[in-house]
Image (tube, rainbow, N blue to C red):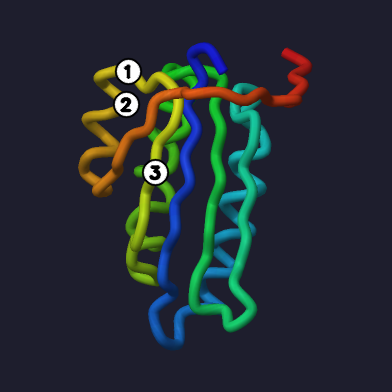
């Protein structure tokens, strides 16, 4: 878990925006899949389609900063038209620069406490 930045974002989908948000999600997944230091980028949706949960894991703070630069430029505005953030929990060891960005999204932080990860990277 050393140096990784992991977070779980929970969002509430705004009324009538699920189809638009699904199209955006597909675009975001495709774009993010090209980032070799993004170790996990998993989306989950509640049975009623009202809540979406996104789990993201980055090799380190630099990898996250690289991702967020593209996110802010390409997707953040459109995403916020579709959802409201209800929870944003960050785990790992984010740098000060990462925290400054995530604070703007109302993030809370949790330090590593135990466990393991079986993520395998090819980089």
CA gap, disc 2 and disc 1: 5 Å
Question: Percent position (x, y) of residue 28?
Answer: 56, 51
**Which residue has dot 3 on it?**
89
Per the image, label 1 sits on a secondary structure element best described as loop
62 relative to 46 in the view: left or right: left
Question: Percent position (x, y) of residue 66?
Answer: 45, 25
Q: CB atoms at circles 2 and 1 under 8 Å apart?
A: yes
Q: Earlier in the sequence, mark 1 or mark 3?
A: 3
CA gap, disc 2 and disc 3: 13 Å
Q: CB atoms at circles 2 and 3 under 8 Å apart?
A: no
CA gap, disc 1 and disc 3: 15 Å
Q: Earlier in the sequence, mark 2 or mark 3?
A: 3
> Vertically, is 67 above or below 43?
above
72 relative to 49 in the view: left or right: left
Numbered mark located on residue 67 in the image: none
Question: Percent position (x, y) of residue 118?
Answer: 75, 25
Report the quarter where the N terminus lies.
top right
Nearer the observer, disc 1 or disc 3? Answer: 3
Numbered mark located on residue 95 in the image: 1
- Residue nearest the viewer, comparing 45 with 67: 45
Report the quarter where the C terminus lies.
top right
Q: Residues within 10 Å of mark 3 (few under 14, many from 20)?
A: some
> Residue at the location (40% across, 36% down)?
90
> Residue at the location (42% across, 64% down)?
11
Nearer the observer, disc 2 or disc 3? Answer: 3
> Vertically, is 73 above or below 36?
below
> Residue at the location (60% across, 22% down)?
37
Numbered mark located on residue 98 in the image: 2
Which quarter of the figure has residue 25?
bottom right
């Amino acid at each position: 878990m050393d140096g990784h930045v992991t977070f779980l974002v929970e969002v509430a989908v705004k009324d009538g925006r699920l189809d638009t948000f699904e199209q955006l999600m597909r675009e975001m997944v495709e774009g993010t899949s090209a980032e070799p230091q993004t170790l996990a980028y998993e989306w989950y949706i509640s049975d009623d389609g009202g809540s979406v949960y996104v789990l993201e894991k980055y090799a380190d703070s630099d990898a996250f900063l690289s991702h967020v630069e593209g996110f802010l430029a390409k997707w953040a505005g459109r995403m916020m038209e579709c959802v409201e953030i209800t929870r944003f929990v960050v785990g790992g060891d984010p740098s000060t620069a990462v925290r400054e960005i995530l604070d703007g999204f109302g993030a809370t932080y949790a330090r590593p406490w135990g466990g393991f990860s079986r993520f395998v990277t090819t980089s």
